[in-house]
Image (cartoon, grey):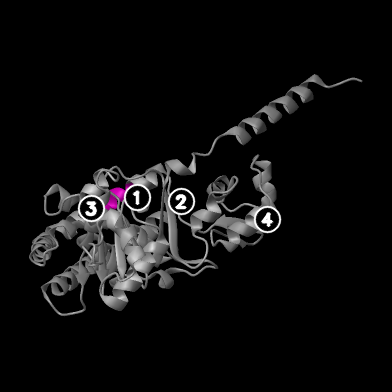
């Protein structure tokens, strides 16, 4: 059989080019920084991202593509994978093409976002530093000096602030979660703590690694006991909480219980929340314009997360608050979990 050598060479080159394109690795999901501002009633977004090569699919659907186009790029993809990601609220289909619905910012965009957020945070901090100092002094007078970072961060910055900005259900609602989820090119270099709520969102944990606390069942039980009795009455639960320094032998809690009342603590928090929210709302339009994020509420959440962590950086740098011991060494300071935990009467968002 006779072959045309030029045609054969072209075919080989095309095949090699296709193979190289297919073999171009996608930066592993673990190297990015994914943030979930969500309320969960089933599966969280990461449950849909982690299996198989779903992250690769999501990343490549930043540009609208059909299933056939994905496969032509050398990306393994099935109808069931796309269906799962659609049910998970991470992709949608328009005019026959699938597209990622969550913000995924590349290296340049991530650096740009953080530069913007730092600029906004610096402006906020200059105007509110005196009030932050007053707040920490008030917390100390309440007898909760060791809980200062937790109360400043999880009660105010990552708690009450959201009632001024946006709540989970106000952003977006999906089958198993509400809120928003986004991915930035790389993790922050500085402290980036988070907040978990248990029970009726009245037992609040500040964390860098949420595994520092007992299981969710134990924490939910703890929240229920405090709500009913003002202490822990269940003797088995007492034995489960004691190794973490959360209760004494009689079940008395060894962390702050914040009452619903008009006092200096609540008044200063309210003043700070109003100041911060006003300045943030004046800047949110930059994010929607610069990164093509259609949902202004998602843009608000993304921007504020970066801003609040920068505010914490400034507070730590100026020694207005300090990093809890358990954040520095979880095992050695296990008994100091009480320093990153508090109970709030009526729930954090009330």
What residue do we see at 48% from left, 57% from top?
102
Q: Is residue 172 left or right of residue 224?
A: right
From the image, state whether disc 4 or disc 2 is nearer to you.
Answer: 4
Contact between labelled residues 1 and 2, with CB atoms less than 8 Å apart: no
What residue do we see at 25% from left, 52% from top?
335
Disc 3, SS? helix
Disc 1, SS? loop
Which residue is disc 4 drawn over? 80
Disc on the earlier residue, 1 or 4: 4
Q: Is residue 337 left or right of residue 82?
A: left
Q: Which residues are magenta?
A: 112-117
From the image, state whether disc 4 or disc 3 is nearer to you.
Answer: 3
How far, Cα to Cα, is label 1 from label 4? Answer: 33 Å
How crowded is the residue under tag 4: few (<14 C-alpha within 10 Å), some, or many (20+)? few
How crowded is the residue under tag 1: few (<14 C-alpha within 10 Å), some, or many (20+)? few
The quadrant of the rendering that contains the C terminus is bottom left
Contact between labelled residues 4 and 1, with CB atoms less than 8 Å apart: no
Which residue is disc 3 drawn over? 336
Disc on the earlier residue, 2 or 1: 2
Residue 64 sits above or below residue 237 on the image = above
Which residue is disc 1 drawn over? 209
How far, Cα to Cα, is label 4 from label 2? Answer: 22 Å
How crowded is the residue under tag 3: few (<14 C-alpha within 10 Å), some, or many (20+)? many
């Amino acid at each position: 059989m006779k072959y045309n050598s030029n045609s054969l060479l072209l075919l080989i080159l095309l095949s090699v080019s296709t193979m190289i394109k297919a073999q171009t690795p996608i930066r592993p999901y673990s190297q990015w920084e994914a943030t979930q501002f969500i309320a969960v009633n089933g599966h969280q977004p990461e449950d849909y991202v982690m299996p198989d090569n779903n992250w690769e699919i999501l990343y490549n659907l930043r540009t609208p593509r059909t299933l056939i186009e994905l496969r032509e790029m050398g990306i393994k993809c099935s109808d069931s994978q796309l269906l799962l990601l659609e049910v998970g609220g991470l992709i949608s289909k328009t005019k026959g093409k699938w597209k990622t619905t969550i913000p995924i910012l590349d290296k340049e965009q991530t650096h740009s976002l953080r530069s913007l957020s730092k600029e906004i945070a610096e402006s906020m901090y200059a105007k509110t530093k005196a009030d932050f100092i007053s707040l920490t002094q008030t917390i100390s007078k309440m007898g909760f000096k060791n809980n200062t970072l937790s109360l400043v961060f999880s009660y105010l910055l990552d708690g009450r602030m959201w009632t001024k900005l946006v709540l989970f259900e106000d952003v977006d609602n999906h089958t198993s979660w509400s809120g928003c989820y986004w991915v930035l090119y790389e993790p922050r270099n500085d402290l980036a703590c988070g907040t978990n709520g248990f029970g009726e969102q009245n037992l609040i944990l500040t964390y860098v690694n949420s595994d520092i606390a007992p299981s969710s069942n134990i924490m939910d039980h703890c929240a229920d006991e405090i709500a009913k009795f003002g202490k822990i009455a269940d003797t088995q639960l007492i034995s489960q909480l004691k190794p973490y320094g959360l209760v004494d032998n009689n079940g008395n809690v060894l962390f702050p219980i914040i009452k619903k009342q008009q006092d200096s603590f609540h008044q200063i928090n309210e003043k700070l929340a109003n100041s911060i929210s006003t300045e943030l709302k004046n800047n949110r339009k930059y994010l929607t314009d610069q990164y093509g994020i259609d949902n202004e509420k998602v843009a608000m959440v993304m921007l504020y997360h970066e801003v609040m962590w920068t505010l914490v950086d400034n507070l730590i740098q100026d020694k207005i608050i300090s990093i809890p011991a358990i954040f520095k060494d979880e095992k050695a300071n296990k008994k100091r979990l009480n320093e990153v935990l508090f109970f709030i009467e009526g729930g954090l968002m009330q």
